[in-house]
Image: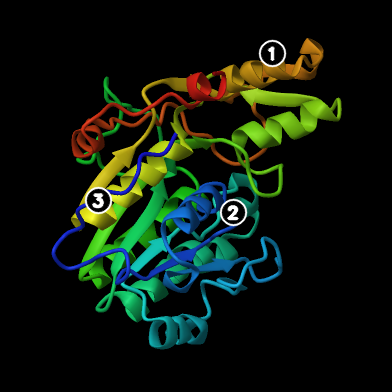
Amino acid sequence: MFSPISEKMNRHHTLSTIRIFVTGVTSIHGWPLFRYLSEVFQPENLLGMRSPKMHQPSSVNLFSGCITDRETLRSVRDNFKPTHIIHCAGVCDLDVCEERPHWAHQMNTVGSSLIAKVFGDTAHIIYLSTDLIFSGLRTPPDGYCELSKPDPLTVAGRTIREGEEELVSGSTMLTLIRLGLPIGASLTGNKGAFDFIDSRLRRSLPVTLFRDEWRSCTCFGDIADVVMKVISDEVSGLFHCGGPVKRSLHEIGKIVLQRGGYNKSLLKGIFRIEELVGPPRMGDVSLNSNKISRLLGRDLLDPFVISSR
């Protein structure tokens, strides 16, 4: 699923000189990425930060900490001396962010601002952002490209977008990668679209999903390949990374239902206009990933096709 790192590194870095600090290791995309990097780099060249209250996964090069703790970040800078920061930390739970906007601002905006202030002059920052910075109300025919203007509907989307701006203004070397909806197994077994839906259906709990909220489904292998390409070739700039097929949340639910052999009555589909409570919902936030496909030299993959093999 993952392609190997380029054998010929750029003139500035080799595998032995690269030192990577990964924030948000327990996130849906952070954990599989950290596992992959652990297969490529020696433990002394890779450091990961978990959420403050989490003690798993356990490893000599993992510790618990908060993205808003400036002193912790300074300690990593001064003692570990990273050449690259892969920033996966933040919060994108729409309901929680609407209920706790100050916390969302701290995690998504202030956290990214501190990453820029502490590491902006010393390391190449790679920020794995999200498609939630778009509304999906006026989607271009081929999906949102890198020139599309962000117009977030939610607290999550707005604070993440503000975090992007903090990194752009405060980083000497930045690669901003906006992800579609990552599809795959999570560390806790209940994070991310696939695991969350499966965890409810497996316990015979009902799930209601939108028929008209569309996302570009993205596989972990593509995320890892993109990050390794960025590191090996010292690529900077803005890229969109979404799979080749967009699916509604309800369609994803049907895939989970079918694969698990669950009771069909547990899954209900509704349209956004039918939702009377809850946060604002995006429409079609599918991404145009032509630019990143050219960087990789291949098309992105469909995670549901891969996982069914």
User: Viewed as shown, does residue 195 lie left or right of 8?
Assistant: right
The residue nearer to you, when weighing 308 against 155, is 308
The residue sitting at 65% across, 44% down in the picture is: 191
Instruction: Identify the secondary structure beneath mark 1.
Output: helix
The quarter in which the C terminus is drawn is top right
The CA distance from mark 1 to mark 3 is 41 Å
Q: Position of residue 55 (x, y in %)?
A: 71, 67
**13 with respect to 129 (left or right):** left
x and y percent of residue 248 in the render? Answer: 52, 21
Q: Kindly give the residue lying farthest to the right in the view shown.
A: 204
How packed mark 3 is, by other alpha carbons closer than 10 Å (few <14, some 14-19, many 20 or more), is few
Task: Examine the rendered structure and indicate whether residue 252 appears above or below residue 193.
Answer: above
The residue carrying pointer 2 sits among few (fewer than 14), some (14 to 19) or many (20 or more) residues within 10 Å by Cα, namely: many
Measured Cα–Cα span from mark 3 to mark 2: 42 Å
Q: Residues within 10 Å of mark 1 (few under 14, many from 20)?
A: few
27 vs 168: above or below: above
**Residue 184 position within the rendered picture, expressed as x and y whole percent measured from the top left:** 57, 35
Q: Which residue is mark 2?
A: 97
Residue 142: name its quadrant.
top left
Left or right: residue 225 versus residue 101 is: left
Residue 270 in view? no
**Circle 3 SS class:** loop
* Residue pointed to by mark 3: 7
Task: Give the number of the mark in front: 1 or 2.
Answer: 1
Residue 300 appears in view:
yes
Q: Which residue is mark 1?
A: 258
Q: Amino acid at mark 1?
A: Gln
Mark 1 vs mark 2, CA separation in Å:
31 Å
Going from the N terminus, do you reach mark 1 or mark 3 first?
Answer: 3
Residue drawn at point x = 37 percent, y = 66 percent:
85
Of labels 3 and 2, the one closer to you: 3
Q: Of the residues under marks 1 and 2, which one precedes in the sequence?
A: 2
